[in-house]
Image (cartoon, rainbow, N blue to C red):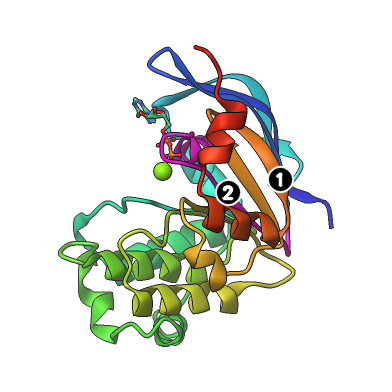
Amino acid sequence: MGAALEIRNLHVSVEGKPILRGVDLMVKQGEVHALMGPNGSGKSTLANVLLGNPAYEVTDGEIIFRGENILEQEPDVRSRAGLFLAFQYPVSIPGVTLANFLRLAINARLKAEDAESKGISIGDFRKLMRAKMDMLQMDHSFAGRYLNEGFSGGEKKRAEILQMAVLQPSVAILDETDSGLDIDALRIVSEGVNKLRGPELGVLVITHYQRILNYIRPEFVHVMYNGRIVESGGPDLALRLEETGYDWVRERFEVAE
Ligand code: ADP
Ligand code: MG
C-alpha cells in the first residue's frame, strides 16, 4: 500500500512566528502512528495544517494526500477526499443536531465521489448511525441533541469518533482525544478506534501521554520537539517516554533561540 499521507519538510508559521521547522512523516493506510511530545512542541499545529486551518501559514514543504499535494485545497475538499481530524477542542454548533450534521457530512462525501448521488436514505442513515452509536456506547438520544452543546468532555470525544465511524476516512488524525477523559471513557473511545482499524485506515494518534497508547497500540511512535520530529521508533519508544518523561528530549534537543 502506498503512502496515504506524506508530509515533506513542512515549515509552518503562526503570526509570523515559525512553529514547525521541517517535519517529515509518512502514514500509510493500515498503519497506526503515535505523535508524542511535550506541550507546545507543535503537535496541534501539525493537525491544524493537515486539515487546512487558515490561521497557519505553510512557508515551505509539501503535504501529499492520496497522491495529490493538498496545500492549496480548502478544508472541506480535504475532508471529502477522506482526511479526518478529531479536534482537541471540538466546537459546539447550536441549532444543528448531531444527526443532521452527520447526514450532511455523509452526503457531501457521497457527492464528492459521485456528482449524481442522491445521498443516503433516511432509513439507511438511521441504521448506520445507531449501529455506530452502539459501538461507542452512546445513548441514541444524542442524535437529536445540538452538536457538542452541553456535552461533557467524554461525550464530545465520543461524538468525534462517531463522526469518524460514519465518514470512514482513509486517514484519521486524533488530536489529544485522551485529554479530559476518565478511564472508562478512554477505554470506550479507544475500543471504538480499534474497531475502525483496518487495512483501509491510517491513524495518527496525537498525545502528550502514553496512557491512550495502552489501548490504541501504535506500530510507530514519533516524538516532536520544538517543531521537529526528533525521534521515531516502535511502541517501546512510548514506554520509554512514560518512564523518563520528556526531560531527555529537552536536554538533547534544546536549541538556543
Ligand atoms: P502542542 O499541540 O504540541 O501542545 P501547539 O501546536 O498547540 O503545540 O503549539 C505550538 C506553539 O505554537 C506554541 O508555542 C503555541 O503557543 C503556538 N501556537 C499554536 N497555535 C497558535 C495560534 N493559533 N496563534 C498563536 N500561536 C499559536
Ligand atoms: Mg495540542
Question: In terms of image quarters, where does ligand 2 lie?
Answer: top left
Question: Going by the image, does 14 lie left or right of 154?
Answer: right
Residue 249 in view here = yes
Q: Which mark is residue 36?
A: none
Segment colored magenta: 29-49
How crowded pointer 2 is (Cα within 10 Å; few <14, some 14-19, many 20+) is rated as many
Q: Position of residue 209 (x, y in %)?
A: 47, 56
In what quadrant of the picture does the N terminus appear?
Answer: bottom right
Sequence-first disc among 1 and 2: 2
Residue placed most toward the observer, 48 or 125: 48
Q: Residue at x 41, y 62 (%)?
A: 178
The amino acid marked with disc number 1 is Ser
Q: Residue at x 42, y 71 (%)?
A: 162
Q: Residue furthest right?
A: 1
CB-based contact (under 8 Å), mark 1 and mark 2: no
Residue 115 part of the magenta segment: no
Instruction: Identify whether 115 is placed above or below 52.
Output: below
How crowded pointer 1 is (Cα within 10 Å; few <14, some 14-19, many 20+) is rated as some
Instruction: Identify whether 51 is placed above or below 111.
Output: above
Question: Going by the image, does 86 lie left or right of 213?
Answer: left
Which residue is tagged 1?
232
Q: In what element is the residue under mark 2?
A: strand
Which residue is tagged 2?
35
The amino acid marked with disc number 2 is Leu
Residue 38 part of the magenta segment: yes
Residue placed most toward the observer, 99 or 14: 14
Q: Residue at x 39, y 82 (%)?
A: 133
Distance Cα–Cα, label 1 vs label 2: 9 Å
